[in-house]
Structures are given as structure tokens and as C-alpha cells.
Amino acid sequence: NHFWSDGIALYSKDQKTLLQLIDYSVEEYAIPAATEVISGKAFENCAAIKKIVLSQNIRILGEQAFSCCRALAEIVGMERVQEVGRNAIYGTAYEQNQEYIIIGNTLTKYSGEQSVFKVPEGVEVIGEGAFRTYSYGKTVDKLKEIVLPSSIKKLASAAFSWRNALKTINLPEGLTTIDYDVFAGCDALDSIHIPSTVTELSPSAFSIRDWDRQKSKMTAITVADNNQNYC
């Protein structure tokens, strides 16, 4: 027998990987201590689940692990997660109720309404589309300034895309990676400075769509004199 089950979910024999939820009527569930990985889509579309207590050894949430579990309002132990797959908590009440979400060292989502947002110290990655807004041109965006911490190392793809009110953002020394479309549609951003530590800069990081070129206020992108890759 290569599997183990507690009657609620199916696991690998050593209990290190939760493979699939079995009982879709469960409302609260504590994951066994040995579990390190929750597989992709393991709880997807479970309408009943309201609370999950992650194990002490949890490391990875697979893609869409809790996707569309709309009643899921409480997830205990998220600070222990080291890696999160795409849309792991998409469509959950937990996601919708948080101004921002940090999983491990990654800020995965911001949905606040502040004019200035300071990313907490200790965050190393701004996740894919974390600040992205889908209401471009439809509503007035309030976010005008983002302050990144000294701990930041990577800006993942589309991290700040379509934030059309964003005028100011600092890129601190220690940042190494700026992925594609990070600042796409950030029309109010007029200048930006690339620090010396950046070693990976996507050619499309500051992409301006042809049909919106006249809206962009970008006038200067400068690079630190001692950046050996892009200076």
C-alpha cells in the first residue's frame, strides 16, 4: 500500500504529501504534523471548508491547492510556508479579507487602498502580479508610492502592472531580479533607478503598450554606475 488516509484526505504513505481531499463535507481540518506538501488542487472547489490548520512541517502549497474554497476564511500557519504555487488560495475568503498576504518570504497579494504602502522588512520577493490591478482605466487607483524594504531581492513578473497612479518606488541595493512586465501600465511612473546589484533585468520590465504610449510619463531610467551588467 503506497498511501495513507485518515478518512478525510489521502496522503503518501509517509504522510509527507497530502494528495487529495476525500471528505468534501469537512468544515475544519488540522493537517498531520508530518505533512510537508499540499498537492496542487488538493482542496480545490471544496465549498464546506472554513478553517485549515497547517502542519508544523509544512513547506509547500501546490498550484490551486485551496483555489475557490470560498468559505475558507482562516488558514493557521501560513508563516511556515516556504513555497506557494500559482493561485494556491485564489477565491478564498482568506485571500479576500486580507489587505496583503505574505507567504514565507514572498508578498503574494496587495489589495489595500492606501496612497503609500510600505512593504514589511523581511520580504524578499514581490510575487507574480501581487499588486496588479484588473480595473485599469475603470477606477481611480489610490496607490501612489510603494516603499520596498532592504531585504527585497526579486520582483516577479507583472508585480506592479497596471498601477496607473504609481508615481514613486524605490529599488534598494540588494535587489537582483526584475522580471517581465513588472511596471507595465504604470503610466504615472516618471523615473526609476536600477541599483548596482541587479543581475537580471527583463527587456520588457518597463513595457509600454503602443496604444498607451502617449499616456506614459516615463522620462528616465538610470542605472547605478557600478552595475557591471547594465551600466
Image (cartoon, grey):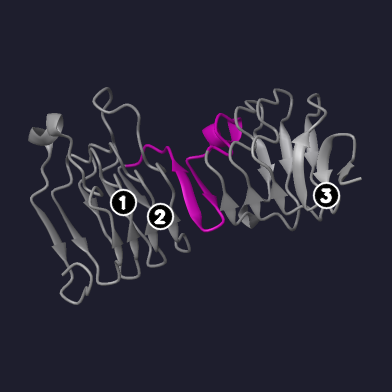
User: How many numbered badges does the structure rendering display?
Assistant: 3
Which residue is under mark 2? Answer: 119
Q: Are marks 3 and 1 in contact (CB under 8 Å)?
A: no
- Indicate the secondary structure of the residue bearing disc 1: strand
Residues drawn in magenta: 87-114
Identify which amino acid the numbered label 3 is placed on.
Pro
Label 3 vs 1, first from the N-terminus: 3
Q: Are marks 1 and 2 in contact (CB under 8 Å)?
A: yes
Q: Identify the residue at the far bottom of this view.
A: 226
- Indicate the secondary structure of the residue bearing disc 3: loop
Q: Position of residue 71 (x, y in %)?
A: 66, 26
Which residue is under mark 3? Answer: 32
**Residue appearing at x 19%, y 61% in the figure:** 193
Identify which amino acid the numbered label 2 is placed on.
Val
Cα–Cα gap, marks 1 and 2: 7 Å
Q: Position of residue 93 (x, y in %)?
A: 59, 30
Cα–Cα gap, marks 3 and 1: 39 Å
Question: Quadrant of the image for the N terminus?
Answer: top right
- Disc number for residue 146: 1
- Disc number for residue 174: none
**Residue appearing at x 21%, y 43% in the figure:** 207
Identify which amino acid the numbered label 1 is placed on.
Ile
Cα–Cα gap, marks 3 and 2: 32 Å
Indicate yes or no whether the magenta region holds residue 92: yes
Depth check: 118 or 155 in front? 155
- Indicate the secondary structure of the residue bearing disc 2: loop
Within-10-Å neighbours for mark 2: few <14, some 14–19, many 20+: many
Question: Quadrant of the image for the C terminus?
Answer: bottom left
Q: Position of residue 139 (x, y in %)?
A: 28, 25
Up the image or down, 211 lies above or below 174; here it is: above
